Image: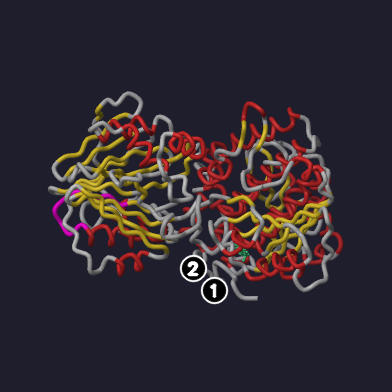
Amino acid sequence: MCGIVGYTGGRNIKEILIEGLKRLEYRGYDSAGMAFVENQEIRLFKKKGKVIGLESKILKETIVSRAGIAHTRWATHGEPTDINSHPHTDESKTIAVVHNGIIENYRELKKYLIDKGHVFVSETDTEVLPHLFEEFYQGDLREAVWKGLKLVEGAYGICVIHKDHPELIVGARKGSPLILGIGEKENFLVSDASAIVSYTRNVVFLEDGDMAVITPDSFKTYEMDNQNEIDKKIEEISWDIENIEKSGFDHFMLKEIYEQPATIRDSFRGRIILNENKVKLGGIQLAAAEIRDLERINFIACGTSWHASIFGKYLIENLVKTISTSEYASEFRYREPVVLKNDLFFTVSQSGETADTLAAIKLIHEKGGKVFGITNVVGSSIARATDGGVYTHAGIEVGVASTKAFTAQLTVILLISVLFARTKNTIREEEAKAIIDALVLLPETIEKYLKNINQIKDIAEKYKDSKHALYLGRGLNFPIALEGALKLKEISYIHAEGYPAAEMKHGPIALIDDNMPCFVIATKDSIYEKVISNIKEIKARKGKVIAIASEGDREIKELVDDLIFVPVSHLVVQPILNTIPLQLIAYYIASAKGLDVDKPRNLAKSVTVE
Ligand code: AGP
């Protein structure tokens, strides 16, 4: 997610835009840029890196302008470079655009525009917008933007300026936030209110399908569908700055847990061909024959990403009927691993900078292997070191404890498994359809689920003073149990261990007593009865059982001490859902203990050392 600031008015526009970008830098800081309308020209300044780099670049510049737009970037398409930075313009620099979101059909639009003679300079999806609007411009900028956006598929929050309109900005939103700020002889368009709360608290929260046109003395809002002018409610912001950056949540971690419906949707957006029940992943450059010839598919990662890689191993075996392995990068890199000719490796990494994972990639290449990256940060070291891969599109993850990046990793791994399984014909089309339908429904299911989590808060309060905890799961829920345990220990400092449920009898059961809470993932599947037996073994030793169970499961209630129901989904999608309550349990226990949830002791967001 990127930061956008648009300003029309008579104040020091350079200062307002720079200060606004600094407020939004937590949303992404790969690069920054700004554009102004001055003397019937677009003046453009862009710089890779943080806002401070742009600030020093324009320090000596005198800007006399009453309409300007600015952007701090979280890269989704195209590495962080000066040329890929926003704003983007058409070749004659008559129009400039800043964009937050993903344009799914940018390849088709780019081809259409190149065929009409437009010249592109960047690798971004965004650059199609100024060329598109220029194509339709006949004097009315709002109309040109409206006509251009009718061809666009995907998500956007945008601001647009034109060299012949010295005091005008056009904005539009669909799937990415855009807020209209109303001042005295000045108006704003921003991606979140923290950028303008120092200047005005009077805002209009634009909704999907809204357009806005602002000048220093006026603001109008329109419905995209029919171009009707509409009146929108003006609200007053009561939050303080920090609160706004967290969108009203107490911590970034909780905000990111609640972002998961949107980030899971972004991780499969534009990658599913619904009417063919197929998956398309541009970054997996393998011919069908190469996929069919694969002998092993191996996952390598660290921490939470390693849990996602175990999920991958089980899925590849289950759906693709291919040998699959999951390894800690830190172990793999110091062994003498065998790399077969028809091996394929995937590294999984949120940051794309984990030293052990990078070293594993180097070793694979030294042994002649091929490795794709499942990565969240575009242009990161791992993204550049691998032979291709798939971005998870979870947006910047500020909380050190990974949440939305993990569920986005699971989603991408599921997409890869369906792609390979359909290519190898190891699942029937109707099975692929069932999985895809469940995945498409998942964001809405999680959205509903997150609306009522009071029972989870109560359970967290009940167990917050525990000294130890066990997390148990079987099959695809085993990595979810590991992830639940890691979440708890890394932010609440309570010792927690994840195990395959059946493994408990081989030692850990000695730990069970009435002070040992056991979180057991017991959603309905083919081994549900086995998990019920494990629960009974715990209860026989007076352990406390908190079960994650399927909505509608009547049998389990009298067997356990506490019950957290989750909606029922497809067997291979269910583990993604089961993750949510475990994230919340960890969050509310750590929060109740008054700990620094976003920056836990001893940890870093990216372990770039060995
Ligand atoms: C997860 O909550 C932790 N922050 C940590 O285990 C993390 O997953 C691990 O360091 C791997 O990081 P990466 O995904 O950026 O490679």
Compared across the picture, whether 155 is left or right of 422 comes to left
C-beta proximity under 8 Å, tags 2 and 1: yes
Q: In percent of the image, x 82 and y 53: which residue is there?
A: 342
Compared across the picture, whether 406 is left or right of 360 comes to left
Residue 261 is situated, as x and y percent measured from the top left of the image, at: 53, 43
- Give whichever of 596, 30 is nearer the camera: 30
Q: Is residue 11 magenta?
A: yes
Amino acid type indicated by mark 1: Arg
Q: From the Cβ of disc 2, is ligand 1 less than 8 Å away?
A: no
Separation (CA) of disc 2 from disc 1: 8 Å
Locate ligand 1 by image quadrant.
bottom right
Q: Is residue 292 magenta?
A: no
Residue 28 visible somewhere in the drawing: yes
Given the current orientation, which residue lies at the most extreme front position?
Answer: 117
- Give whichever of 501, 34 is nearer the camera: 34
* Secondary element at image label 1: loop
Residue matched to label 1: 601
Residue 428 is situated, as x and y percent measured from the top left of the image, at: 78, 30
Label number found at residue 596: 2
Residue 563 visible somewhere in the drawing: no
Compared across the picture, whether 31 is left or right of 8 comes to right
**Number of callouts in the render?**
2
Residue 187 is situated, as x and y percent measured from the top left of the image, at: 20, 47
Q: Classify 534 as above or below 592.
A: above
- Give whichever of 397, 142 is nearer the camera: 142
Highlighted magenta segment, given as a residue range: 5-13
Compared across the picture, whether 574 is left or right of 179 comes to right
Q: Classify 598 as above or below 519.
A: below
Give the mark, 2 or 1, whose residue is nearer the N terminus: 2
